Image (cartoon, rainbow, N blue to C red):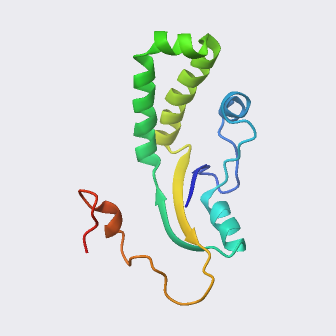
Amino acid sequence: MNHGITSPDADGQTVGSGVSEFMDKYVFPHTELPHLHSVIREMARQNFEIYDVESLRPHYARTLAHWSRRLEKQLVAARTMVGERTLRIWRTYLAGSSLAFSRGWLNVYQVLASRQEVGGPTELPLTRAWMYHQGGVAEG
């Protein structure tokens, strides 16, 4: 399973307005934001067979907004734990990233792949139903 934030730009152009520079300097140094096709191509070059690809962009936008709201409710405690500078960086990161995901400036994909040692069928179910079961027990 590869879970990664990706660029919507097929040529790998950075997000504008200094966002990429901010992220590289303060949040995720030396990060890369490849396009999904680059991720899949590199996995294929290593003989991984792609089984499933799912975009979690709308979910991640909501998750980051939730984390941002929770942080805002705990500013005094957070400031005590990490200091003013780090707190400002993370407030900016969470709010800005939520906006970036909601607007489609960033995406996050999960790519399920496997390197088959022998040919033939896989042991994966034929549908996604197993992922959406209730009560901890898959049906079917």
Q: Is residue 119 above or below residue 49?
A: below
Residue 127 on image: x %, y % = 36, 74
Question: How many labels sit on residues?
Answer: 0
Q: Residue placed farthest to the bottom in the image?
A: 120
Q: Is residue 17 visible?
A: no
Residue shown at 40% from the left, 38% from the top: 62
In percent of the image, x 64 and y 14: which residue is there?
85
Q: Nearer the viewer, residue 37 or 9?
A: 37
Query: Could you say where residue 109 lies in the image, as x and y percent from the top left?
Result: 52, 55
Q: Quadrant of the N terminus?
A: bottom right
Q: Is residue 100 above or below residue 52?
A: above
Relative to 10, does residue 90 appear above or below in the rendering? above
Q: Is residue 98 left or right of residue 40?
A: left
Q: Position of residue 69 (x, y in %)?
A: 40, 24
Q: Quadrant of residue 132?
A: bottom left
Q: Judge whether 21 appears above or below 30 on screen.
A: above
The residue shown at (71%, 72%) is: 46
Give the x, y percent position of residue 138.
28, 66
In-image side of 139 versus 13 (left or right)? left
User: Which quarter of the rendered picture does the C terminus lie within?
Assistant: bottom left
